[in-house]
Amino acid sequence: MKRGDGVQCPCCAGRFRSFSGSGGNARCPRCWSLARHRTLYLYLRDNGLLRPSLRLLHIAPEEGIYRHLRGNEGYVPADLFPGTRSVAQFSVEKIPHPDDSFDVVLCSHVLEHVPDDAGAMREFRRILAPAGRAVLQHPIKLTLAHTFEDDAITSPEERERAYGQHDHLRLYGRDFGDRLRSVGFDVEVIRYSDELSYRDRRRFGLFDDGEINDGDLYVAC
Ligand SMILES: [Zn+2]
């Protein structure tokens, strides 16, 4: 391999000839990170959000990010379905922590599975300290102005057809940021890969070619 060739996974520091798959589905052959995981990791790293001193609530932790945070004193990983990992178990609709108790909430690809997503957004706002922020990343169909959800759609087959995945409860549109604003957040939308050089986007495999954008970061405070 020539110097400068190949790719690199920021989550696990692995170097490879290429990722498996392409676009948003380009996976790290070692830690299985996708483009969105690598984007999220780079954003957190570059903005000092992996600091051990931060009180950080991480919902449904991605392995490649969890491994960088798990030793931190203020780190609380949580999942409604924890599996074999020792993380707290609760729903984001009712978070068992007091008001103003976190500096950062990390929540990626969760709210499309949550019945009361507005309730979860209110919970994030409640538990965040006044200077805190939530970093959210969700699948969004950018050609859709308004989020599509219909209570009459209940079977896995219908959900797959309507929302693109059998266990999704809605398909977010461009109003995702407005939904956060409606519970009182200020929101900044960051396409972090655009802030990197072409060389780094190529090296870290950050090209998103899908109809559904799942890499943009919604930073809410
Ligand atoms: Zn990796």
Image (spheres, rainbow, N blue to C red):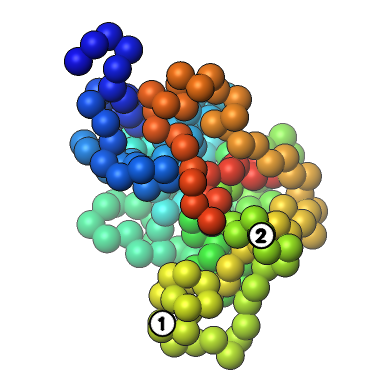
The N terminus appears in which quarter of the rendering? top left
Q: Which residue lies furthest to the top in this view?
A: 3
Q: Which residue is drawn at 72% across and 40% down?
A: 188
Q: Is mark 1 on a helix, strand or loop?
A: helix
Q: Where is residue 137 in the image (x, y as percent from the top left)?
A: 55, 48
Where does label 2 land, which residue? 143
162 on left or right of 2: right
Task: Please tell me whether residue 201 is drawn above or below residue 89 in the rendered image.
Answer: above
Q: Residue furthest bottom?
A: 152
Q: Is mark 2 within 8 Å of ligand 1?
A: no
Task: Please tell me whether residue 23 is drawn above or below residue 95 in the rendered image.
Answer: above
Q: Which residue is drawn at 60% across and 59% down?
A: 141
Q: Where is residue 194 in the image (x, y as percent from the top left)?
A: 59, 29
Q: What residue type is labelled 1?
A: Pro
Where does label 1 land, which residue? 156
Q: Which of marks 2 and 1 is in front?
A: 2
Answer yes or no: is residue 101 visible: no
Within 10 Å of the Cα at label 1, are there few (<14), some (14-19), or many (20+) other Cα atoms?
some
Q: Position of residue 212 (x, y in %)?
A: 54, 56
Q: What residue type is labelled 2?
A: Thr
Q: Which of marks 2 and 1 is nearer the N terminus?
A: 2
The C terminus appears in which quarter of the rendering? top right
